[in-house]
Amino acid sequence: MKNRGNFVFEYILFDLDETLYPKEAGVMKVIAERILCYMTQKVGIPEDDATTKKYDYNQKYGTVLRGLMEEYRINPDDYLDFVHNFNPKEFLVPSPPLDRMLREIPLSKVIFTNADAGHSERVLDALRVRAHFDAIIDIKTLNYENKPRPTAYKHALGLLGTWGERCIIVDYMPRIMIPTKDLGMITILINGGHKNIAIDYCVPTIFHVERVIKSILPLEKL
């Protein structure tokens, strides 16, 4: 990574689902199933079309929610309540290693998620790491402007009163990182995946983030 001059890191922004915990936990599988149920039962999309539309919406709009808002004018709060209507504690347990790692990172920590705050609170409570996060920037806080729409990142930075060069972002989806390039954020990709031009560091698990942070922070003094 290049010398960042006089910039000092202030925030580390964490995605929530499948970033703070492994995919194998099964939380996103349940959410995906409930999304399909919402599309068929609430919106009335035929089952044969729902799976294809779900994929297409994720590719075109970034989330199924945005696709349904654009094409069916659904109520976003109704959607979020429906797809998150389950208890994460059925899938997640407290994570002392995550608790320790977050405690050791000397930056302000923020959840930055396309989910809503209620779901975020329940996940953080299940993992027992809520105390480490100073804020949750959720889809409602962003006025439903979801990642990877560039406006979502700019809005998040505005809410924090900072700029990209002072932030590190951690996520598990490579395409989520693309808009961060122009904003100057340092990016850490969880679970490997396909690296792109916007990704600075790839690590296998969330627990490897601390090592990256420790390698970055001394550069502030260069």
Image (spheres, rainbow, N blue to C red):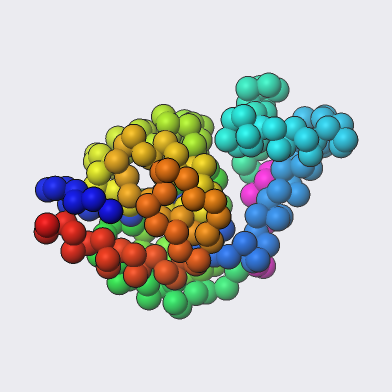
For the residue pair 157 and 203, the one nearer the viewer reads as: 203
Q: Eyeballing the image, is 36 above or below 127?
A: above
Q: Which residues are magenta?
A: 82-91
Decide if residue 189 is on the left or right side of residue 82. Answer: left
Please tell me whether residue 85 belongs to the stretch shown in magenta: yes
**Furthest residue in direction bottom, as rendered:** 96
Q: Measuring 47% from the left and 45% from the top, which residue is drawn there?
A: 196
Please tell me whether residue 182 belongs to the stretch shown in magenta: no
Residue 11: give x, y in percent of width and height. Answer: 28, 52
Decide if residue 68 is on the left or right side of residue 159. Answer: right
Q: Measuring 42% from the left and 36% from the top, which residue is drawn there?
A: 179
Decide if residue 179 is on the left or right side of residue 82. Answer: left
Q: Eyeballing the image, is 28 above or below 198?
A: below
> Could you say which quadrant of the image residue 40 lies in?
top right
Q: Measuring 63% from the left and 22% from the top, which residue is drawn there?
A: 70
Residue 164: give x, y in percent of width and height. Answer: 28, 41
Looking at the figure, which quarter contains the C terminus?
bottom left
**Total marks drawn?**
0
Q: Eyeballing the image, is 52 above or below 115?
A: above
Residue 126: give x, y in percent of width and height. Answer: 54, 67
Residue 144 in sight in this render? yes
Residue 20: give x, y in percent of width and height. Answer: 50, 62
Q: Measuring 14% from the left and 48% from the top, which residue is drawn there?
A: 5
Residue 16 in sight in this render? no
